[in-house]
Amino acid sequence: MVDVLVELQKELRGELKEPLGPVYTDTDALLTDTDGPIIAVGDIVTYHLLEAGYRPDVALVDGKTKRERVEREILDAIEGFDSRREVENPPATLTAELLEVLVGAIDGEGTTVITVVGEEDLAALPAIVAAPEGAAVVYGQPDEGMVLVTVDETLRAECRDLLERMEGDSERVFDILGV
């Protein structure tokens, strides 16, 4: 049984449309503006970072982009990580398993790819809350590019607020994230 902690209700979806940071179409430029560990959320973002010669510290992938299967070439390119974990996370939710594995990967040694059975789209929010100050969370902005979020207290507070307003047990989310 999947332990869903919070679910994104329709009223909040609009708030997630605006990017939380600058949007890049050039991976090298994004990497130049990054100083610290990188958490990549999404197959296409992870693929572009790997193609540019950078292996993210943590990558979350689900084999899809815009709810369609990604090409085999992209799936095959997402390799070479020190560890690989698989978690279940239904669409528009965050599960205890995803959060626990995410925190373990952020706090752990080496690089980790987390393969999500379901959907990883909301993982950027807890990643921003759990990541160390100055870390980068990179996620895709459909049809625009890659969003670079440099973690600071203001963005953490914004993401905590969004997580708090989701339906479910946000207190347990924060407990797992250690905040």
Image (tube, rainbow, N blue to C red):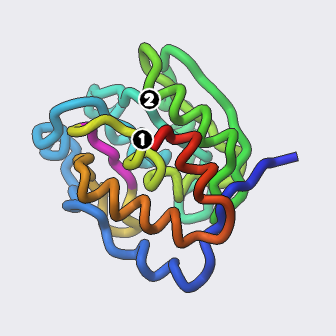
Q: Secondary structure at mark 1?
A: helix
Q: Residue at x 29, y 63 (%)?
A: 20
Q: Residue at x 69, y 39 (%)?
A: 97
Residue 35: name its quadrant. Answer: top left
Q: CA distance from mark 1 to mark 2?
A: 8 Å
Residue linked to disc 1: 130
Q: Position of residue 39 (x, y in %)?
A: 38, 38
Residue linked to disc 2: 106
In screen coordinates, is 134 left or right of 164?
Answer: left
Predominant SS of the magenta segment: strand
Question: Looking at the picture, which amino acid does disc 2 mark?
Answer: Ile
Q: Position of residue 29 (x, y in %)?
A: 13, 45
Q: Is residue 108 above or below residue 49?
A: above
User: What numbered label is drawn on residue 56?
Assistant: none
- The reply to whether dot 1 and dot 2 touch (C-beta < 8 Å) is yes
Q: Residue at x 43, y 66 (%)?
A: 161
Q: Residue at x 33, y 48 (%)?
A: 138
Q: Residues within 10 Å of mark 2 (few under 14, many from 20)?
A: many
Q: Magenta residues?
A: 135-139
Question: Looking at the picture, which amino acid does disc 1 mark?
Answer: Ala
